[in-house]
Amino acid sequence: MTTRKAVLRVGVLLVAVAALAAVVISMVSAQNAPAWIAQDENWAASKQKLQAFGERFETSEALYEALKQGAGGGKPLTWQQMAEPAYDWSGIYTRAKGGLHFDPDLRPGSGPDSAKLTPAGQQVVKAKADQIARTGGEYDPISDCRPPGTPRWFTEPFLHEFIVTPAQTWLINEMVNDVRRVYTDGRDHTPAADAYPTWNGDTIGFWDGETLVAHTRYLSSGQYQRGVQPNYSDKTTVVERWHKIDPKALQADVWVFDPINLEKPWYTRQGWTRLTNDDRQLRIRYWDCRENPNNSIITTESGTSQFPDFDFVPNDGDVSTDAAVKKAGKK
Amino acid sequence: MKTLMIVFALTAVAIPGIPVEAHHSGAMFDDKKEVTLTGVVKAFQYTNPHSWLLVDVKGPDGKVTTWGFEAEGPSTLTRAGIRISDFTPGTPITITGHPMRDGRPAATWIKATRTTDKKEFVPQAGFAIR
């Protein structure tokens, strides 16, 4: 055997071993993916397990791929399955608990949050706390009816509808007529060269039995909610596992990855409760700030919020003690 | 109208603040104060993201001031059992809210009581899950 052939054989062998190792590692990761965990009396320990699972992955893409391999690539749904209880997500829901906290396990009004923040992320939170302590308020960017965006989407407390079809699942938020589309027809993300950030990004997914697994990227930056909660950057990506746990409840494991604001992925279990609607008067209605001029909001010089000009007050600028109103609302 | 009698009580009583605002910070309202007024409904603006109940209130000098009481949008009000038809123009009510800090006649709507049947309407009840 010539030296050249020997080197070639060794090279081929090394490549084969590396490929085998990659497959084994990914299979091990996939095999260790925790199955859906009920939120029972052991939830604190289960939550730590799910947080630790997320922390095993450098990226959300790696986490998503591990879940996909664990599901054998996932199995497409059929229209016949839509009538099965596991995929019938019809009804009107609202957030089950958590108030406006991104982590529903935190008590409303409590803090700090459970995210493992980078120094940059901590600085943002501190600045918000300082702003609120100094002025008593803040200006929320969605005050002009722009979309809350994802991951803030999970925290909005109003009505939701969820529609499962074989090719797409629609996650609907009453607020600003907002729809997240999860493509489950096998497509990949928009190529990076053709992508741009949007409020809800681009979401693809697959079905692992009765669990919808989704991956989102190309998100716009935003904040998880008002108050002393972190921001997220446009580098944020999200992995979700959605599951109908009983006829009145949907839940989702959510792992948020953000290299700018989060040291570690932030795991939370989000939940929605189906509301009774016996008289069928409850329905989602159009949401537009321009429908009523009294819902117009401006930011003040101190960075808080104010109504500039009520239609039931003939002389806002004369009555108000706020300089922002005197400037904006004087007729 | 007899029911135009005014009860105006601005108190500095500490009240637990509840974040009610759907799409904006509540910085403009003083959640440590309450105002209670009696008047008649001028209009019920049943809109997203917030509804506004406009109430005409006659002062001691006989001058009528229109107050606006902000509540959540139609879905939360529906869940609270508050319909447009509950507050048709001219309905006499007594209403309590957290007033604005800047002196304008507006407040968050905590509780309204219809004078005729004493029925109470609490928008925050719409957040109860049932």
Image (spheres, coloured by chain):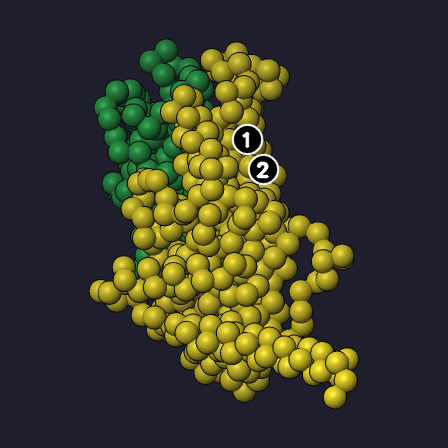
Chain colours: A yellow, B green
Q: Callout 1: helix, strand or loop?
A: loop
Q: Nearer the viewer, residue A122 or B65?
A: A122
Residue type marked 1? Ile
Tell me if residue A275 comes above or below residue B23 in the rendering: below
- Which residue corresponds to the image point at 37% horizontal and 35% vertical from the top-left? B109
What's the mark number on residue B105?
none
- Chain that bears disc 2: A
In this rendering, does residue B58 appear at all? yes
Residue type marked 2? Asp
**Residue that mark 1 sits on:** A297
**Residue that mark 2 sits on:** A144
Q: Residues within 10 Å of mark 1 (few under 14, many from 20)?
A: many
In the shown orientation, is residue A46 left or right of residue A183?
Answer: left
- Which residue corresponds to the image point at 36% horizontal and 47% vertical from the top-left? A114
Tell me if residue A232 comes above or below residue B26 in the rendering: below
The answer to which of marks 1 and 2 sits earlier in the sequence is: 2
Q: Give residue A146's quadrant in the image.
A: top right
Q: Callout 2: helix, strand or loop?
A: helix
The image shows a total of numbered marks equal to 2
Task: Check if mark 1's residue and mark 2's residue have beta carbons within 8 Å.
Answer: yes
- Which residue corresponds to the image point at 31% horizontal and 31% vertical from the top-left? B96
In the shown orientation, is residue A21 left or right of residue B73?
Answer: right
State the image coordinates of residue A180 (x, y, percent, origin top left): 58, 60
User: Is the N terminus of chain A in the top left, top right, bottom left or bottom right quadrant?
Assistant: bottom right
Tell me if residue A275 comes above or below residue A289 in the rendering: below
Q: Nearer the viewer, residue A310 or A125?
A: A125
- Which residue corresponds to the image point at 47% horizontal and 13% vertical from the top-left? A321
State the image coordinates of residue A214 (x, y, percent, origin top left): 54, 66
Q: Nearer the viewer, residue B14 or A276?
A: B14
